[in-house]
Image: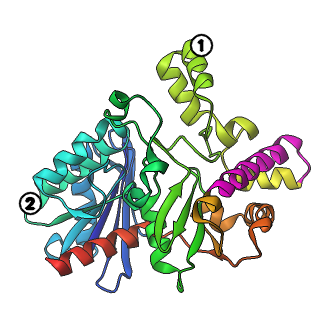
Amino acid sequence: MILVVNAGSSSIRLALFDATLTERLTAAISEIGGSGELRLGPDRRPVSAPDHEAALALLLDAVTGAGHPVSSLAAAAHRVVHGGARLTAPTRLTPEAIAGIEGCIPLAPLHNPANLAAIHALAQIAPALPQFASFDTAFHATNPEVATVYPLPPEERARGLRRFGFHGISYASLVTTLAPLPRRLLAFHLGNGSSLCAILDGRSVATSMGYSPLEGLVMGTRTGSIDGMAVLQLARDHGIDGAEALLNRQSGLQALAGTNDMRVILERAEAGEAEAAFAVDHYCYWAIRHAGSAIAAMGGLDAIAFTGGIGENAAPVRDRITAGLRWAGDVPVHVIPAAEERQIARDALLLLDRA
């Protein structure tokens, strides 16, 4: 069995996969540090976990009670948001790899510390259990340098200011799932966080997110791409922390329609509400605009794929985007269920097989 661990700043989700990559069980704890809830399949109960180690211990006890003790696990595999420029493939978590993840904390200050907290907690609870990591940035390591370099002075580039791209585990899963794989595939991961990726011969050659997940498409609460001078003006008006909160948590669909729930926005737009209709128009317009540059990076288009909560479930959004790209050719459109945790388990199994 492979235990997949997806740790956030205040939550942990586990998924258990067998050797055929069949999901056998899921469990999660929310509100770490407060009054939370433990979910094991459909069952729910209140719990209190002061930190990630306590939360993980509670989860493993619940998983053991469901017939899957730690001794039955072959490995644990973690989702890590940022691997930087060096951790560009799934890897076993050695002290050197963990130090590399720690070195990327300035690049992902909200995510990597939570990922590391779960890694360290599991090492305390089950020190003999092999641990692996898959990185959201890794799939985009194949982007050419011309696509990743910001034209800044050399000393600023040396500090790591470059485009990285995210949602890479989702795109890797999509590539593994879609058969036959089109040579020039435009992939959209649309959810509360949204991005697109130009995939040429199975490799990422361009993506919409950049140094952070803020760049690119309009999102649930993020602006997407915005002029740097506008960001500086927001910082003058609201301070650095205020501007960061505004750009990441108070913008996007939330700012345009008063909610980041695309289902609600589409219902309101269908009912004739102008504000909601504009939010849908804006979201799709900028997806189409960014898609044009991705198609150019591939030299054409052979297929489109959608994944993520909006990508899978919001047919009006998919239809609007594909209609806006018909100039690139009448190509097949695929809807692929997101399967990031299965991809993480697949990565770990491949590494175990090579060991």
326 sits left or right of 42 in the view: right
Query: Is 133 on the left or on the right of 243, as rendered?
Result: left
Disc 1 marks a residue whose amino acid type is Asp
Query: Which three-letter amino acid code belongs to the residue tagged 2?
Result: Pro
User: Per the image, is 204 magenta?
Assistant: no
| Residue at 46%, 41% in the rendered image | 212
In front of the other: 126 or 173: 173
Quarter where residue 226 is shown? top right
Snapshot colouring: rainbow
Question: Which region of the structure is painted magenta?
Answer: 271-293
**Pick the front one: 147 or 185:** 147
Instruction: Answer above or below: position of 297 versus 331.
Output: above
Q: Residue at x 12, y 61 (%)?
A: 126
Q: Residue at x 26, y 77 (%)?
A: 349
| Horizontal side of residue 188 vs 266, given as left or right | left
For disc 1, the marked residue is: 237
Q: Which residue is mark 2?
A: 127
For the point 54% across and 35% down, the residue is 248
Question: Badge 2: how crowded within 10 Å, few (<14), some, or many (20+)?
Answer: few
Element at label 2: loop
Hey, which residue is sitting farthest right in the picture? 272
Residue 272 forms part of the magenta stretch: yes
